[in-house]
Image (cartoon, grey):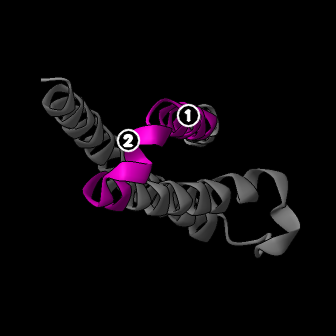
Amino acid sequence: MSVLPYISLFIGICTPLLGIAFGITWVDLHYQLKKSPHLRAQFNTIGKRLCGAIFFAAINIAPSYLPFLFYPGNKNDTEFMIFASAAAFLWYAIGFLATFVELIIEAKRENAKTRT
């Protein structure tokens, strides 16, 4: 039994969740993002990492749905590409989450400064 469908399923589930988290954060911190250039720069970094994660998710999911794009006789190339894009997706997703947590901590810190 191959693990490739499970990798694609995991990435297919995680990618929209990252997008939803990005959107909710933008709505929640919109006022603070307009005021603080530091938070805006971090938010832009999160956006770039989200774009990278979406790109590698598309590369990972494409062989499952578009097999005619690849050489039908060479299954090893497709498997390697799926594993490589899954590793790259994980790299971008972990970077997204780390910067996301840092942004929320900084936003709370700046919000606490403005209240006192």
Please tell me whether mark 1 sits on a helix, a strand or a loop: helix
Percent across and percent down for residue 39 are 30, 51
Could you tell me which quadrant the C terminus lies in?
top left
Q: Amino acid at mark 1?
A: Val
Count of numbered badges drawn on the protein: 2
Within 10 Å of disc 2 (Cα), the crowding (few <14, some 14-19, many 20+) is: some
Q: Is residue 36 left or right of residue 90?
A: left
Asked whether 15 falls inside the magenta stretch, the response is: yes
Give the residues in magenta.
14-41
- C-alpha span from label 1 to label 2: 10 Å
Q: Residue at x 48, y 29 (%)?
A: 28
Q: Is residue 68 visible?
A: yes
Q: Is residue 45 left or right of residue 101?
A: right
Q: Nearer the viewer, residue 111 or 54?
A: 111
Q: Amino acid at mark 2?
A: Gln
Of discs 1 and 2, which sits in the foreground? 2
- Point out the tag, 1 or 2, that comes first from the N-terminus: 1
Q: Is residue 15 above or below residue 42?
A: above
Q: Nearer the viewer, residue 55 or 73?
A: 55
Write down the residue under mark 1: 27
Write down the residue under mark 2: 32
Residue 93: mark in rendering: none
Q: Is residue 24 left or right of residue 102?
A: right
Where on the picture, by quarter, is residue 101?
top left
Q: Residue at x 73, y 59 (%)?
A: 63
Q: Is residue 82 above or below residue 11?
A: below
Q: Residue at x 20, y 32 (%)?
A: 114
Percent across and percent down for residue 100 are 33, 41
Q: Is residue 15 above or below residue 28?
A: below
